Image (cartoon, grey):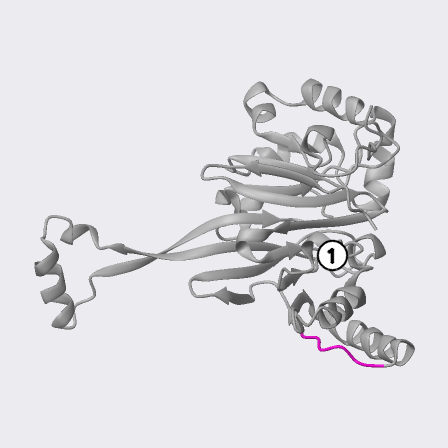
Amino acid sequence: MAENLSSLEVGDPPVHLLGYSVAGEESVVGVPELDVMFDIGKAPRQLLSLNHVCLTHGHMDHAAGLAYYFWQRDFQDNPGGRVLLPRELHAPVERMLRDWAAVEGHLAPFELLPMQSGDRYEVRRDLFIQAFDVPHGRQVPALGYLVYEVRRKLRPELAGLTGPEIVALKNKGAEVTFATEVPLVAYLGDSQVFDLTTVPLLADARVLMAECTFVDADHVSRARAGCHVHVTDLPRLLATTRAQAVVLTHLTRRSGMLTARRALKKTLAPADLARVHLLMDRKHKSEDPQPASGDE
């Protein structure tokens, strides 16, 4: 189990990310202040207390820890937790958990929430998760997730009124505020590049987490075969997002971190390079000095 999680703060105001992502091995990113983790990897212990798991797809490196998550929470007297997942995976994941109960000897409490593109789930008052389709091959049901806030703001035409005047209008039944949706964090999971502006709010997420599995010049065909992103695809992706920070995940161990940094510098314009972060960069490691993802 990967305990050498990366820890970084990005965006303004900052968002704290805690995660681990190496292609084919494990992918999980938690956002503690939002009580959400994206994918679950092997369910690292530091993230077990988070109550909401957004599962993008069923590949083992993203989903292996599902049973462990529920059983460990139960063992620690912290039952519950819920997993949002593509609706096509709901039945097989439920079967898997019930079969595991036969192996374990008891059934831990679990909650699965089947999602499809456009569905939203309320995490807490005024904080929501919205699902959207991502392209990861025709045989792999896959979703991305956007976490956003709904904030109430004073109607512009009332800006010159005093507090008592606004209260008086409200007491008369007037609507003195309006709702605005503020996109915070988006996670694409394993996904080929697509136009983020086609999904409401997605292009304006403060923090975008996206895969970049391959960076070597001779790995373009691998990227295409696996429906993954090659570093040369990133300019198209970055052109469709206004994110303050773009965090790249899922780098293959076939490429070292130094190679990845060099490829990004060669491929991206300086303004884009300034907002791009590699999740597994050694400088972000919170534990375990051992290098990951081919770090030099």
Of helix, strand and loop, which one carries label 1?
A: loop
Q: In the depicted view, which residue is nearer to us: 206 or 4?
A: 4
Residue 132, percent from left and from top: 60, 58
- Please give the count of numbered marks on the rendered protein: 1
* In this picture, residue 24 sits left or right of residue 167: right
Residue 189 seen: no
Q: Main secondary structure of the magenta part?
A: loop
Q: Residues within 10 Å of mark 1 (few under 14, many from 20)?
A: many
- Residue 152 sits in which quadrant? bottom left
Q: Quadrant of residue 255?
A: top right
Q: Residue under circle 1?
A: 40
Q: Is residue 85 magenta?
A: no
State the image coordinates of residue 139 (x, y, percent, origin top left). 82, 59
Q: Left or right: where does residue 237 sit relative to residue 232?
A: left
Q: Is residue 186 left or right of residue 109?
A: left
Q: Position of residue 40 (x, y in %)?
A: 74, 56
In percent of the image, x 84 and y 51: which residue is there?
Answer: 1
Question: Where residue 30 sits: x, y (%)?
Answer: 64, 51
Residue lying at the far front of the rendered structure: 76
Please state which amino acid type lies under the numbered disc 1. Answer: Ile
Q: Quadrant of residue 239?
A: top right
Q: Which residues are magenta?
A: 106-111
